[in-house]
Image (cartoon, helix red, strand yellow):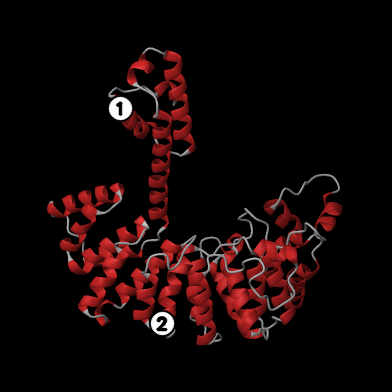
Amino acid sequence: MAMGALTEGTDFPVGANAEERLWRYLQYPYYLGLFAQRVVRAHGISKHVKEKLCHAVLQINMHLDQGQEPGPGLFSLSAWLSEHKCLTREDYLGLRRGLIWLPRLTDSYIEDLEVVLPACEGIFRDTRIQRDESIELILMILTAKEAIGAQGRDIFDHLMGLNTLNRSLKREVCQIVVHNPIPFPRGEFEHPLETSAQEQDRLSIRFLPGNVRRRAVIWLSRLGRDPDELLKRLLKPNTVRGYGGDQVASGALDLLDEKWDDIDEDGRLALLRKAADLPDTAVRKRAYILGEKYLGLEFLKQSLDDKAKSLREWARERLDRREAGEIPTAEELKAELAEDLDDDEQWQVRVDRRKIALELVQHELEGYHSSSLKSDPLKLMMLCVTVATISCAASAPLEYIAEELLEHFGWAIDFKPLS
């Protein structure tokens, strides 16, 4: 079984003396974790053996050597111990340290919700964990993308629904999530347990998932915060700055959607207009969709005057479809509003990159004239190479840049040889 766990999950070398190497490998936490995951799923192995192995893999994280990686299965082993009423405070401490020392840029530690959620339930129920320790661990779990992948929102919803965590604690977590893209800024977060400078450095570069920050706005309202106060504050420009601020504003729009019938007509229209005037294009786009859902095409038509050309083009196309009889149902608009912001973010990134590329090209064009370029092929070639380099670095299509050159010089440049 140990041989199978290592040969399937790692680059363990089989061949001569493989058995001897096997036991050497199992002294390392990473390989022991792979083996333990296989053991807890196996039939015919006693509960006692499984329990000892789970404890060992989790608790060995308290004694990792420099450069050692924790064993995988942090959540599945915790879930097994919880299911069999064997989870201890030492296991919580091992899980905490394992989360801190997760290797970066890997997906080999990611586990399914079916083990992550029971593990969370057990940790917060069975390990005599204190309030400040609970808050810290929740934030560690949510920022441990190497262990949870893209499941942060589902985990967050589950944690906010746990009866073992009181409302005050949940509100404090939500408050941190909404206002801090990095929940453990270096030298600012007071850890409840001893945390080395190296560990603080690792934690200080971990971001909360954007969709978790968006969801936290809804949960703040559900946990007792005044929704009207939240909406007025979070839909004010520059209230939440930095990474994920657009997600928080989108969370405020989700809250406006949820509380629409509870807000007077003037109030909700004022909030919608605030949202449609925010600096984030993706948020304004969502505000126009929400306005279309409740106020119809009259509100959507305002997007034709939006400051972003890309959004004006989107609005024109959308309105053309409406005039052609393509009217979405309430359910379709609801689904569109519920979509993750990721696609919109990527769309906005492309727009921003094109804008940067265009500014760089315009700077390069200063001092150039059509006549001088036509009479100097070498200068023309150098300009083409420069423009192509800018286009590549900014991920902006050459065709887009060529349009600017056409407008500037009145003639086209063929970039195909440089593509």
When asked about the image quadrant of residue 83, the answer is: bottom right
Distance CA(mark 1)–CA(mark 2): 55 Å
Residue 384: x %, y % from top left:
43, 24
Q: Residue at x 35, y 65 (%)?
A: 338
Image quarter (top left, top right, bottom left or bottom right) of the C terminus:
top left
Image quarter (top left, top right, bottom left or bottom right) of the N terminus:
bottom right
Given the image, on which type of amino acid does mark 2 rest?
A: Arg
What is the secondary structure assignment of the residue under circle 2?
A: helix
Residue 4, compared with residue 112, is above or below; it is above
Which residue is under mark 2?
222
When asked about the image quadrant of residue 98, the answer is: bottom right
For the view shown, which residue lies furthest in the front direction?
Answer: 367
Residue 159, compared with residue 367, is above or below; it is below
| Residue 43 visible somewhere in the drawing | no
Around disc 1, counting alpha carbons within 10 Å, would you say few (fewer than 14), some (14 to 19), or many (20 or more)?
A: few
| Residue 343 visible somewhere in the drawing | yes
- Circle number at residue 406: 1
Q: Residue at x 65, y 55 (%)?
A: 104
Residue 186: x %, y % from top left:
65, 66
